[in-house]
Image (tube, rainbow, N blue to C red):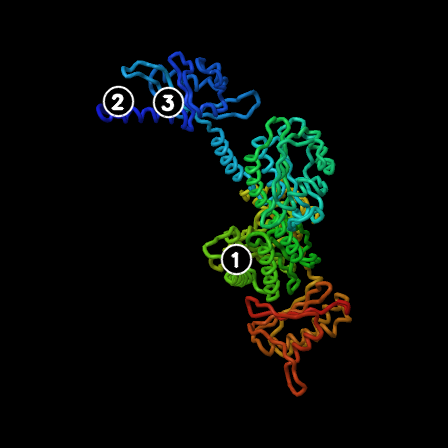
Amino acid sequence: MDALTGGHGEHRGSGWELDKAVLGALFSESPIGLHVLDTQLRLVRFNTAARFVKAFALDEAVGRHPREWAGDFYTGSYEATVLEVLETGVPSLDVEVRGHLTPGSPEIVLSVSCFRLEDATGGVLGVATAVLDITERKRAAARLAFLERSSGRIGTTLDIFRTAQEFADEMVPALADTVVVEVLDSVLRGEASAPGTFMEFGALRCAGRRSAAPDAERHLPSIGEAIGLSSGTPLDQCLSDLRPRIFEHLDPGAQWLQRERVRGRRLTEAGAHSLLVLPLAARGSVVGVAHCYRHPTPQPFDEGELALAAELADRVALCLDNARLYARERSAARVLQLSLRPARVVGHTAVETAYSYHPLGAGGDWFDVIPLSGARVALVTGDTAGRGLRAAATMGEVRAAISALADLDLTPDEVLERLHALVTRLGGERPRPPDIVTEDENQDTTCLYIVYSPITRRCAVASAGHPPPVVALPDGTVEYAMVSAGSPLGRGLAKYGTAEFELPEGSLLLLSNTAMLRAVSDDPQHQLARIGDALLPADRPLQKICDDVVYQLTPEQVENDAVLLLARTRALGPDQVASWTLPNDPAAVAEARAKAERALTDWGLEPLAFTVTLVVSELVTNAVRYSDGPIDVRLILDSPVVVCEVTDDSSSVPHLRHAEEVDEGGRGLYLTWQVSRRWGTRPESRGKTIWAEVALSEEE
């Protein structure tokens, strides 16, 4: 039976013709190279396609062993495969064989399949090898793998210099011997430049570089070096039409190299013989240019490598443009954040303050020192969610809200409860893309609110998810204040508690943003140890202590804002405070006036007697009229004002009225308003306090 026809008779002729056709096509039409070897592995015959396999020199190869015509390719796996198939008869498929035509030439990759040839009785006649040049396929696969791998390693941050350096690191030595990445100065400022002539761009600044040559340092620009751009050069053309250029064989005498005096000289001295110039552009904006060249590697760049480098450059350009947009927003956020911070922290009777404010991460961290009535002060710090313009704007909203709430003289927990409601409402008003949760939305807005009175030396503290203040006592004790942290603002239930404690005069309060403490450690005890080393001794100049704390807590790599507020407590003694409790009786008005006059005399402020006694008498009269219990009167010498306070058991808040000439009442608070610098009310555990400030001099 014939192997092809499977029978005899009338089909034998057609089967023989089919055999001849198959053999003819195999040796003349097949795209796969075929070598027929005898049992001594001498070449007997080869087909037409075998002549096009560059790895083999087949002229006069018939009758010769593969070692004579296959060169370096007939070693290792190729030779072992042929010998094994000849011996065992088991075919071997798709064996990869690699080699070079000449030393230093590009690698060639072959796929070799081998099978034994036998006669009808099973006698061994030799072996046949089918050879396919898969060099381009392997190169394409390697380029695709390189592109995917490099794309994952480039653009890991939103830093222009780091992204450019990542690109250079990936290109060398995989694709080029040397790569220099240059970006426009305008990009570093966050600005976009449209394609056009070189005159629009200004200088290019080196943002990344890499070379495989050991002595290449002298031929490379330094990071940050700025070099001007000349017209009529490949760099100028690339930035104008955004098309990559290839110079397979770079002519050292090219005219454009003379115009590019700095770059041209470096290319020539480095011995560059093949060059790629790649424009970096994204979203219609020019970012910069990259030039890649070969000097130790003898092979020039080819079109396939140009296409690969250009595609990777497009991806890098998008990452660089993202970094540009981030830098622009971050810069704008910093400007906005700095404009919204306290312009200056004025001195205060209650505390001496020092601070450090560095919006390094362009987030929404802030602090405030807010004067309150009765010589008290509010110390505030907090973090707003996220970074950028939105965070800075949110910080401005929250700061404005706290300032307004502070004027109401509410307790710290009440301030945070109202602030929580405001942040919740503001969060609901902002548009949010559907089914998208950003990093900002996963972060929290926190706040720490402290009220300190220099008269009672007591602190009242409430926290909305913010770390408690660090307290350093005059005896050297450093500890965290015992404050329960409620929910961050705008999240969870608005349930906050106020912790109260007394502080000796000269105690230090340290408030900071969350990131600054976490940069030290997540362990509170370790944080305290580091902070304590910088805080103590506590009797040094406060700004020096503040600086030492910053030096101790700021990490080497700063990625977040650094906000620190230090306050040293003061106390007002009997020589600055006078207080009395009077019965709720109309006669108490005259008694209050007399006691106020004596206190002013003791302080040497007799010229203020008329104004202060007028205010005291009007406030006491108001208390007698609208309350039932005893009346507390207090005068505070809080330069540059004298504070008059009257406390009664009525919770009703008085309102300023403008009495007409025929009205019999309603002039008491109006008179107080006229002669006072400012006035107001604050709630107390028993009723309310009405207060007014009288300036010590007319200039105040």
636 and 395: which one is in front?
395
Q: Residues within 10 Å of mark 3 (few under 14, many from 20)?
A: some
638 and 562: which one is in front?
562
Query: What residue lies at 70% left-to-right and 31% top-to-bottom?
Result: 252
- Earlier residue among tags 3 and 2: 2
Amino acid type indicated by mark 3: Ser
The reply to whether residue 344 is in sight is yes
For residue 182, which quarter of the picture?
A: top right
Q: Is residue 553 left or right of residue 421?
A: right
As drawn, 599 above or below 514: below
Instruction: Compute the Cα span from label 1 to label 2.
Output: 89 Å
Give yes or no for contact between labels 1 and 2 (Cβ–Cβ under 8 Å).
no
| Residue on which disc 1 sits | 489
Quadrant for the N terminus in the image: top left
- Earlier residue among tags 3 and 1: 3
| Residue on which disc 3 sits | 92
Find the residue positioned furthest to the left: 9
Amino acid type indicated by mark 1: Leu
Q: Position of residue 573 (x, y in %)?
A: 68, 59
Secondary structure beneath label 2: loop
Q: Position of residue 219 (x, y in %)?
A: 69, 31
Quadrant for the C terminus in the image: bottom right
| Residue on which disc 2 sits | 2
Amino acid type indicated by mark 2: Asp
99 and 193: which one is in front?
99
Q: Position of residue 344 (x, y in %)?
A: 70, 57
